[in-house]
Amino acid sequence: MSKINDFLNNHIKTNNQKYSLIIGLTPSQGARSPKIWNKVYKKIKSKCRMYPADVELKNLKNLLSYLKKDKNFLGGSVTTPYKNHIIKYLDNLNQDAKKIGSVNTLVKKNKKLIGCNTDFYGALSTIKKIKLKKNILVIGAGGASKAVILALQNRYSKSKFYFFNRNKNKLNFLKKNSFKKKIKILDNINDIKSINKLGLIVNTTSVGFNSWIKSKKNYFNLKFFSPITKISNLNLINKKDTKSFTSKNLKLILKDKKNLETFFKKNKKLVVYDIIYNPQKTKLLKYAEKYRNKVYNGLEMNLMQAVRGFMLVNNIKGLNKVKLKMIK
C-alpha cells in the first residue's frame, strides 16, 4: 500500500505510475473528475490515472508535503471544502486563482505546487446561456462561489447582486475590487422576499449534494434539503440506521418542502442555477421546475472546469479536442 494512504480516509493504489488526485473531504462519494479524466487518459493511451483522495483537514498539510516529493504525482483537482484553505500550503498561485481567491486545480512544477482556478471558465460556460435583465441572488461564500460571482459580474454588469451566506463574515471577500459591483448582503434567507425584480437564483453551497457526511456520532445527507431553508442542526441521521428518520428530521424536511412550495408559487419566471451535479436535479431545481421556472445544474460547469484543469495539469493544448474526448 502506498504511503499516500497514511494521510487519506480512503485507500488508493497508484501502482508506482504517474497519477493525479482530486482532493477533498469526500470526493470518493460522487466526484465526476476521476471518471472523466480517466476517460481521456485512456483515449490518449496514457497509463496515468486520477484517484479520489478523501482527506481530513488535519492531514491536508502533510498530504501536500508528501505530494511535492512524490515524482509520480502530476497535480489534480481540489474540491469542497478546501478550495480556500489549501492556498496557504501552496508555493504559488496563477493569475486566475489570485484574482478569485480560491483554488480548484493543482499543477506540479519542479517539486512545487501551483494553485490554479478553472471554475470561472466552467461557470461562464453555463452563465452565457442565461438571458437576464433582472437582479441576481447568490447563495454561498465558498471557493466555487467566488468564481461564479466573478463570471456573473462579467456577464451581467447592469444587474444588482444580492448575497446570502449563513456566516456573513465569509462574504467579506466581496469588498475586494474584483467583486465590488452593486452588491447587497442579506441578513436572513427570509429577506429574499424583499428583493426587487429578482430574475436569477444561484446556489453555490453544497446543500442539496448527494453525499453522506459524518458529524461526530451522526450522519447527514444534504440532498434532502435546499439552501432556501434555514438548517440550524445538521446532526440529522441516526448512526445506527442511516435510512430512517426521527420525527424531528421529518419535520425539517417537510418544512423545507413547504418553504419551497410557498416561494416558487409567488416567484415565477425565474432562472435557477444550482452548481451541484449530483443529483442532476437537486431539491431546489425540482421545485423551481415544478412551477415552470428555467433551471440549470452544475454538469456543464463541472465538465468545462475539468477540461481546462486536465489541460493545465497534463500540459496539453486544444480545448475542444479534450472536451470531445471527455463527453464521447
Image (tube, rainbow, N blue to C red):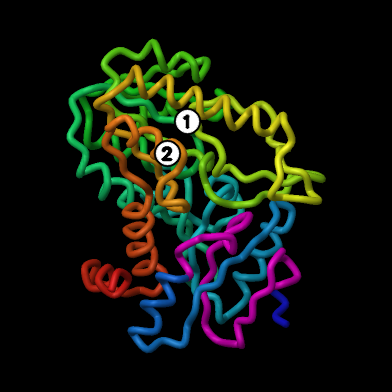
Q: Is residue 182 left or right of residue 281?
A: left
Asked whether residue 30 is drawn in magenta, I would say yes
Between 67 and 253, the one nearer to me in the picture: 253
Q: Amino acid at mark 2?
A: Lys
User: Is residue 225 among what the camera can see?
Assistant: yes
| Mark 1 vs 2: CB contact within 8 A | yes
Q: Which residues are magenta?
A: 5-34
Q: Is residue 259 left or right of residue 61?
A: left
Q: Quadrant of the N terminus?
A: bottom right
**Which element type, helix, strand or loop, lies under badge 1?**
helix
Q: Quadrant of residue 9?
A: bottom right
**Which element type, helix, strand or loop, lies under badge 2?**
helix
Please say if 307 is above or below 125: below
Please say if 317 is above or below 134: below
Identify which residue is drawn at 79% across, 49% down: 239
Residue 220 point in image, percent of width and height: 67, 44
Q: Which residue is mark 2?
A: 146
Give the CA distance from mark 1 to mark 2. 8 Å
Asked whether residue 41 is drawn in magenta, I would say no
Between 282 and 176, the one nearer to me in the picture: 282
Observer-side mark, 1 or 2, equals: 2
Residue 110 point in image, percent of width and height: 50, 73
Residue 296 point in image, percent of width and height: 31, 43
Residue 6 point in image, percent of width and height: 75, 70
Identify which residue is drawn at 72% across, 58% down: 59
Q: Amino acid at mark 1?
A: Phe
Give neighbour class at mark 1: few <14, some 14-19, many 20+ (Cα, 10 Å): some
Q: Which residue is mark 1?
A: 173
Q: Quadrant of the C terminus?
A: bottom left
Identify which residue is drawn at 68% across, 35% down: 234
